[in-house]
Amino acid sequence: MTTASDLRFFPSSDGDLAYLDTGSGDPVVLLHPGYVDHRVWRDQIPALAAEYRVIAPDTRGHGSSANATGPFRWADDLAALLRHLDAGPAVVVGVSMGGMIATDTVLEHPELVRAVVTCGAATGDWQYTDDWTRGIQAEYARTLGAGDLEGWLDAFMRVVPGAHRSADDVDPDIGHRLREMALRTMTKHTPGEKDWLVPVTDSWSRLPKIDVPVLAVNGSLEPVELLDAAQRLARAVPDGRAETIEGVGHYVNMEKPETFNRILLDFLRGL
């Protein structure tokens, strides 16, 4: 279990960015989902650090990292951190938003990436089209617009079981952890503040240029459209494959950590 005292800070061009750096060996970067922080990887960090150097940042605007005060791209933040740490090329592993950042980074900074693992994501150009997820996104917008943090948290927590389960079907500790992290991140921001994020675009057409191994790992309870997009990602790159973990949803690394760790370590050892 990491503590605040384990975090280090990288003085970026726009504020300090927090990260954990532990273990030794070939570098593996763990990128968390949106609204939470590096602690989402609690069950992966010690397992990986036994063999690898594990770098787990808090993405800009999340956890202990600074908010943006001007235009930025998450992939550029990660590239700056890896150069600062002399830690490239690294294997970049991401869930949800983190998975999008992973594919963005290999497209924009290919010299810094040795392999990519995405979970609950495809590329930054992909958008959810299923009614359930679109409904959640609409609820996010409504509650944030009203300054209703509790309402936003309720919507956020519905993503944990997903469309086909109830909260009772998931270990309550997962929900407690995610809620605490999300509350911490959301209280860093104010209603109506400017979104400075600059998206990486034209990603699908550039996927065939990715010349490193790509593994897409997803829970079987994700929307069909996301699973299809992950398969498309794996097919589009020269060295890609997709793997599905049965009976879990969006936070696959938290719901079945032992299975996830086995798949990830097998992939890493095979590089």
Image (spheres, helix red, strand yellow):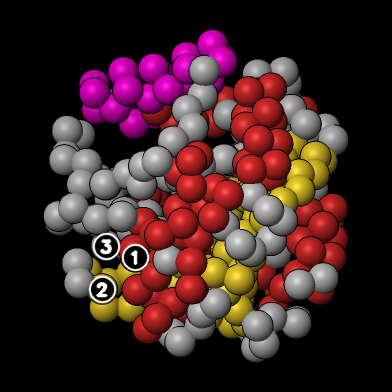
> Measured from the top left, where is residue 101 in percent x and y?
46, 53
Residue at 79% across / 64% down in the picture? 267
Near mark 3 (Cα within 10 A), the count class, few <14, some 14-19 or many ≥20, is some
Q: For residue 247: magenta?
A: no
Read off the residue under disc 1.
77
Badge 3 marks a residue whose secondary structure is loop
* Comes first in the chain, label 2 or label 3: 2
Residue at 57% across / 74% down in the picture? 90
Read off the residue under disc 3.
66
Residue 12 numbered mark, or none = 2
Near mark 2 (Cα within 10 A), the count class, few <14, some 14-19 or many ≥20, is few
Q: Between label 2 and label 3, give the one nearer the viewer.
A: 2
Q: Between label 3 and label 1, give the one nearer the viewer.
A: 1
CA separation in Å, label 3 and label 1: 11 Å
Taking the image as drawn, is residue 174 in sight? no
Q: Quadrant of the N terminus?
A: bottom right
> Measured from the top left, where is residue 229 in percent x and y?
62, 32
CA separation in Å, label 2 and label 3: 9 Å
Q: For residue 144: magenta?
A: yes
* Comes first in the chain, label 3 or label 1: 3
Near mark 1 (Cα within 10 A), the count class, few <14, some 14-19 or many ≥20, is some
Q: Is there a contact, CB below 8 Å, between mark 1 and mark 2?
A: yes
Q: Is there a contact, CB below 8 Å, between mark 2 and mark 3?
A: yes
Badge 1 marks a residue whose secondary structure is helix
Residue type at tag 3 = Ala
Residue type at tag 2 = Ser
Magenta portion: prevailing SS class: helix
